[in-house]
Image: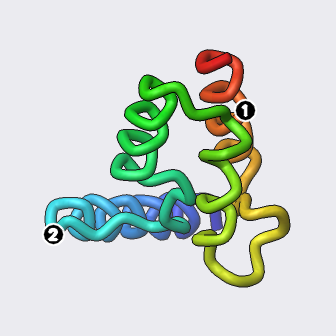
Amino acid sequence: MAETERENIRESLEGLDAAARKGKHGGQPPVITDDMLHTVLRRRANGESVEQIQRPLRAKAPAGRVGGYSTDSSRRRLEAMRRDCV
């Protein structure tokens, strides 16, 4: 039984490696894209407040995501950006 489980794990890992080589990656896309981050940093450098920048970005968040955040990591990234920009 343990050998079967190891074989299943090996096959799964091989499948994930093959998908990665094709540019396919699992999981949800990040809520804060690199383009959004660049925009936020540029607007903050131009003197806009975090609240002015944040409102339109939340409006662009995909439906079904509470508060515009999809994951704890996305929320933490936005909060870290806020701390760094204040």
Which residue is found at the position 43% from the left and 53% from the top? 33
Q: Position of residue 29 (x, y in %)?
A: 48, 65
User: Taking 74 as reference, is 55 above or below it?
Assistant: below
State which quadrant residue 15 falls in: bottom left
Q: Is residue 42 left or right of residue 5?
A: left
In this picture, is 64 found above or below 68?
below
Q: Tell which residue pokes out farthest to the front in this image.
A: 47
Q: Amino acid at mark 2?
A: Lys
Choose between 14 and 67: the one closer to the eye.
67
The three-letter code of the residue at mark 1 reads Glu
Residue sticking out furthest to the right: 66
In this rendering, would 43 be left or right of 16?
Answer: right
Residue neighbourhood size for the residue with mark 2, other residues' Cα within 10 Å, grouped as few (<14), some (14–19), many (≥20): few
Q: Residue at x 68, y 17 (%)?
A: 86
Q: Nearer the viewer, residue 46 or 35?
A: 46
Res 56 quadrant in image:
bottom right
Label 1, label 2: how far apart the Cα atoms are: 33 Å
Given residues 18 and 5, the one toward you in this image is 18
Q: Nearer the viewer, residue 41 or 20?
A: 41
Q: Nearer the viewer, mark 1 or mark 2?
A: 1
19 left or right of 45 in image:
left
Q: Position of residue 81 (x, y in %)?
A: 61, 28
Q: Quadrant of the N terminus?
A: bottom right
Q: Position of residue 66 (x, y in %)?
A: 84, 68
The numbered disc on residue 22 is: 2
Tag 2 or tag 1, which sits nearer the N-term?
2
* Residue tagged 1: 79
- Picture quadrant of residue 7: bottom left
SS state under label 1: helix
